[in-house]
Image (cartoon, coloured by chain):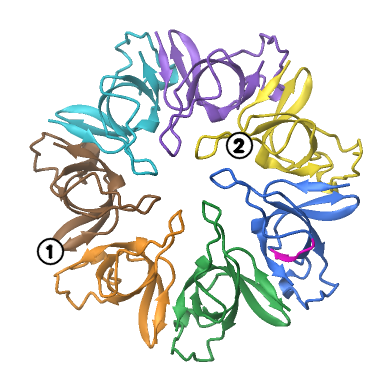
Chain colours: A orange, B green, C blue, D yellow, E purple, F cyan, G brown
């Protein structure tokens, strides 16, 4: 089953704090119960600029990202808890 | 009887949580009483960009969508409860 | 006597809930005392885009519309209660 | 003595509710003490669009208008109470 | 000593209510203690439009103006109380 | 040591009220404890307009300015108390 | 391990107040417990202007900066406490 986020939205799989990442990122203690690291599952086609041209997103499926810990809306797809958020909620890419 | 949403609005038929979707999407428990999955019934012609050109919507009639659960305004058309919302309230397309 | 709404405003005649419409639209119960269906009486010439060109409205006199039930300002013209609202308050056209 | 409103402002002479207008407009009871009908006395030259071109107003001196009843700032010019408001506060033209 | 207001600001000398103006303007009673009539002392060079061109102000030194009575910031220049305000705070020109 | 303000920011040296300025400016009494006169120490390169062109500031190092008395952020550079503020916080130039 | 900030964000290493900087900058006492001096670790590629062109940032890795002391979001990367903030939170460059 596929889910295609609309416009500048992305679908994100949250990476749990207890599974230490390859990059060695550890989320600060105060955020421990709700870590803000994730992996992009799929991305929208982007919004349009003033001339009506589509502006592609800067992230792509597979990217490991950091995002604001209260960002996004939770959904369950095929039994898995995922998040839909806007690209502007993403702080950067780990790689 | 036809209803044509204006500008960037769409008409949406809510899909009840108890009828499990083909895609296997299950809405999280806290949202159980008001699921946020739906089907596009009809769409507006879009708003205009700065140059006055019409920008068509990215969704079309028949699309299965996820939308913010408090989005839209309820109307009854031909005895059926439907929702009118803006395209920006739609998070993505299932399919 | 004529009334010409300015810019993107329209003049609307409210259609009472008790006079069931041809299209079979019934407004939800909670809105029963203040139905939000109407008919366009006259329209403004539209606002201007960034280049100063006039952008005509998408609705015209005679259109049957749905509008947010708290939209518009009430006026009495020739003894009739009417509403002046912005086109953006209109959700769609019934037809 | 002349007064030239600046930009998109207009100078308005309020028409009292007790002097029934030629057009037969009667302001709703709840607004009786502060009617919102008036006549344009003079208009500004308009604001500029993004390219710096002046955009003339859609109303002109002599127009009979309806305006939001709390709109405008009261001034006394040559002993007469008048109102200065923005064109966007004007709902339409009676004619 | 000269003072050059920046951008779209103007320097204004307040005209006291007790010195009745040539134009015969009398400020309404409720505003008696803080009249809103003034004379432009100097003006800024204007802001820039989207293309970076300077847009000159519509008022010039010497203009008699009406302005919102709470507008501007008070300064004392060469012992005289003056006001610095934005052109958008000016309602119109008396002349 | 140099400090280069970013974008449309400027670095300002506050001029104390007790050192009466050459221009004879006296700040009103209510502002006596925190005067709002200063001298520009250095300026940013300006922001970019919609076309991406840099828009230079209208003030330069050495300009004597008036600024809103709560404007800016205090910093200590080489033992001296200075202020970093945006150009839009500056009301005008004394000269 | 690399972290690439998105859009107009930058990754910043906070410089503690007790390690006096080469430039001799001392943060005011009231801010002593949370100094606002830092060093840019990495920068995003910038946002896009209205024409869709990428606008590069004005800061680069290695720049010593001053930033608003409540700016940014704290993250721990490879065991080090860092901050992700927007370029607009940066007041200027020390050099």
Q: Crowdedness of circle 2 by 10 Å Cα count: few (<14), some, many (20+)?
A: some
Report which residue position mark 2 lands on. D55
Residue at the spot 40% in from the left edge and 50% down from the top edge: G50
Magenta segment includes F44: no
Residue at the spot 72% in from the left edge and 50% down from the top edge: C44
Left or right: where C73 falls relative to E80: right
- Give above or below for B8 relative to G85: below
Quarter of the view holding residue A12: bottom left
- Give above or below for F8 relative to D2: below
Q: In terms of secondary structure, where does tag 1 sit?
A: loop
Which chain contains the residue that carries disc 2? Answer: D
Residues shaded magenta = C62-67
Mark 1 and mark 2 on one chain: no
Res D80 seen here: yes
Report which residue position mark 1 lands on. G79
Left or right: where A87 falls relative to B16: left
Res F35 seen here: no
x then y, percent, for residue A45 = 39, 69
Quarter of the view holding residue E47: top left
Mark 1–mark 2 Cα distance, whole angstroms, equals 59 Å
- Looking at the magenta stretch, what is its main secondary structure? strand
For the C terminus of chain A, the quadrant is bottom left
Q: Are marks 1 and 2 in contact (CB under 8 Å)?
A: no
The disc placed on residue E23 is: none
x then y, percent, for residue F2 = 15, 31
For the N terminus of chain A, the quadrant is bottom left
Which chain contains the residue that carries disc 1? Answer: G
- Give above or below for F16 relative to D46: above
Q: In terms of secondary structure, where does tag 2 sit?
A: loop
């Amino acid at each position: 089953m596929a889910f295609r986020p609309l416009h500048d939205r992305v679908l994100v799989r949250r990476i749990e704090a207890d599974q230490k990442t390859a990059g060695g990122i550890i989320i600060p203690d105060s955020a421990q119960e709700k870590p803000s690291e994730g992996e992009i599952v799929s991305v929208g086609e982007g919004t349009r600029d003033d001339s009506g041209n589509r502006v592609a997103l800067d992230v792509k499926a597979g990217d490991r990202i950091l995002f604001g810990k209260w960002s996004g809306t939770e959904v369950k797809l095929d039994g898995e808890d995922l998040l839909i958020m806007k690209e502007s909620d993403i702080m950067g890419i780990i790689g």
